[in-house]
Amino acid sequence: MRDTFMETLLLNARKNPEIIFVTGDLGFGVVEDFQKVLPNQFINAGVSEQAMMGMAAGIASTGKRVFVYSIGNFPTMRCLEQIRNDVCLMNNSVVIVSVGAGYSYGSQGYTHHALEDIAVMRALPNMNVYVPSDSIEARHITEHLCTGKAPSYLRLGRSGEPDITKFSSNLKSNKIIDIRDGKDGTILFVGPIGVRVLAAEEMLRNIGISVSVASVPFVTELDLLYLKDAVKKGPIVTVEEHSFRGGFGSIILETLNSLNLNCKVKVVAAKQVNLSEIGSQTYLQNQNGLDEISIFNAVKACLVD
Amino acid sequence: MSRDSNNFKALPSEVLAQKARVEILRMTSVSKASHVASSLSVVDVLSVLYSGIADISPKTVSAIERDIIILSKGHAAAALYSVLALKEFFDADWLNAYCSDGAQLGGHVTSRNVPGVELSTGSLGHGLPYGLGIALSRKRSNSKGNVYVVMSDGECDEGTTWESALIANHYKLNNLNVIIDRNRIQSLDFTESTIALEPLARKWESFGWEVIEVDGHSHKLLSKSLEIPSLKPKCIIANTTKGKGVDFMENSVLWHYKSPNESELNDAISQVEST
């Protein structure tokens, strides 16, 4: 996903000299091609996220489209006020790219886990949030961001995620992407956790429960008609590798509420019981209620209760 | 002194600053807003910049290669707004509504719909990284136009100041100028009693900047120091007096917050006009 993003960005930046790439001294083995091919469009700001973000906003104010790249919480939490004031308030054309969503950097510890970023970034005015589930969505969204102007946040996994969606050349910006079609309810998810959602869907199918599964990469631009149809079908379960507090599940709940739509909703999100737990991404997903069985149980509970 | 009796565009910078001081006093008194003393300390720097040092005028506010002035100490909004209004960037009537309901102009610098303002500020430490970005982008694209970031000395407490100082030196941004309003007072106390900044000039020098210390109320010396060509990013430490021009406001922490009442206003204006 990370490599797809960089390849797509480089392709676009070669055609468009207004695209500038700024890194906070991260991306070893990932950013070098860009640096080599387009040195005049590449800036390493060093380990100074706050100055980097203010600087990125300043660069954008000169008519550039600036991609700011770092990992985990570094390009969001560490420089939140720079994003709020210099990017969002000034409506500057900055795309914040964070690699390592959720527990991607599991064994590196909580300082490297990105579990509150969707909530924080979606709270900012003028900010669009994008969470691709695989490299196909990542490529499409990167293309979309290269031609856009708005302040944006792109939440990427790390690398090696399997592709679970199919590329469609006419993907609309608010598209919710169906992966399975079912009749009893809907699971909506964001990000590479979709792999585990599909495993849960298979378990449900094996006991005769048929649910739709869809990826929601355009988190802050929801397809409302899709939601209206989903509510007619049955309960909605949301899944995200992110905190319960204010994330994707909250977005769906708030949106349904604002549309006066009623259905059972369950939010599957990271429990964050022990912040200091160490382990692989899969291990930490399991420990935090983001495994197939937890997703399976959430759907079952909605249908049985 | 009536502000609509003259054509102010050709005003000498000293006269501009004097008239701006009167506006600052009126604005903060009428609105009962803070930061009158911060505005009085920096108004000479702004008057010099907008009187020909920086290539910016109401006609060139959107010109691509205009000089950029960023007031990073956004709490001195009254100073910037007064100077911009006197230079006819916008209608001087806007000053009368300062900080009132629905006003164009508030207590911290806002860029939206205010001609001449490049960046909304108010949280300290934002102006320099932003100006740095503009300077770097221009350098990369061989674009003309200098960047002037006017900061408070208290802002030197902010980490972004020194992050930016490192980066500007690394990229050899000699199109970037910082002017520090060195009035030696910050929010609660004198800077040296709060978090000591001295030796401030040596700090900036050691970061690779061209540093010039100057009397921040001398228009002649400010102009001269700003005009000296430099191969490095430039930092002008403008030694100023907080509350400059009004004896009871000078060098006092209290007037960081207090606004003048009617009798204080009259006294202050007569002091400013008699200089």
Image: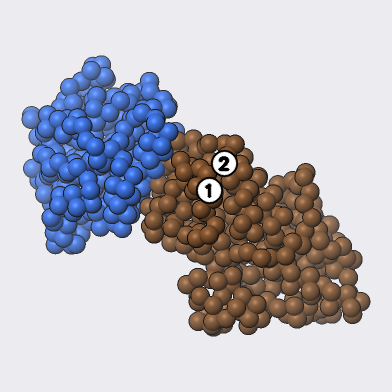
Residue that lies at the very extreme toward the right in this rendered image: A208
Q: Amino acid at mark 1?
A: Phe
- Which one is nearer the viewer's eye here, A235 or B130? B130
Which residue is pictured at 28% across the width and 38% down the height? Answer: B174
In the figure, the shade used to draw chain B is blue
Circle nearer the N terminus (2, 1): 2
Reading the image, the residue beneath label 2 is: A13
Reading the image, the residue beneath label 1 is: A34
Mark 2 or 1, which is nearer the eye?
Answer: 1
How dense is the environment of label 2, judged by Cα within 10 Å: few (below 14), some, or many (20 and up)?
A: many
Number of numbered discs overlaid on the protein picture: 2
Q: Amino acid at mark 2?
A: Ala
In the figure, the shade used to draw chain A is brown
- Which one is nearer the viewer's eye here, B87 or B105? B87
Q: Could you tell me which quadrant the C terminus of chain A lies in? A: bottom right
Report helix, strand or loop for mark 2.
helix
